[in-house]
Amino acid sequence: MYQRALQGKEKALGEEHASPLDTVNNLGLLYAAQGKLEEAETLLECAAPEDLATDGANLYLADGPRLLRLERNAATEIRAFHQPISALACIAGGALAVALGGREVRIYADPSATTPRWSLS
């Protein structure tokens, strides 16, 4: 339910609005209350929880240079970059765009792909 609320708020208000951040915090508190402590810890301690994206099934979080996927009852680090992630976006068809340090954008065919399909700098 919180993930749906987050998607709706991001769509209506934009990712930069404070209200989606409140939803991320509330989702973290809900996970803690459900005993899903790893997910709660990931959401509540993330250095930049405003850098997030969802494909409808998974929630992707940027924590500095780390890209994390929150799915069901596990938080998984997908990869770590040499620069901090400045923005994330899920793209139709399962692709993921990652902006690094405000200077480079990498587009991966899917979030677990090891090499980007495109890189723009």
Image (cartoon, rainbow, N blue to C red):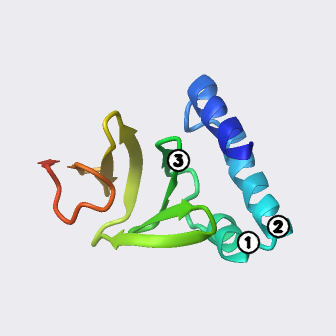
Say which of 77 and 88 sits in front: 77
What's the residue type where badge 2 is placed? Gln
Residue 4, by quadrant, is top right
What's the residue type where badge 3 is placed? Ala
Q: Are marks 3 and 2 in contact (CB under 8 Å)?
A: no
Q: Position of residue 37 (x, y in %)?
A: 73, 76
Query: From where the camera sits, is residue 121 visible?
Result: no
| Mark 2 surroundings: few (<14), some (14-19) or many (≥20) residues within 10 A | few
Q: Secondary structure at mark 3?
A: loop
Q: Which residue is mark 1?
A: 36
Q: Position of residue 119 (x, y in %)?
A: 14, 50
Q: Are marks 3 and 1 in contact (CB under 8 Å)?
A: no
The residue positioned 55% from the left and 70% from the top of the image is 75
Q: CA distance from mark 1 to mark 2?
A: 5 Å
**Vertical relation: 113 (above or below) 95:** below
Q: Which residue is mark 3?
A: 57
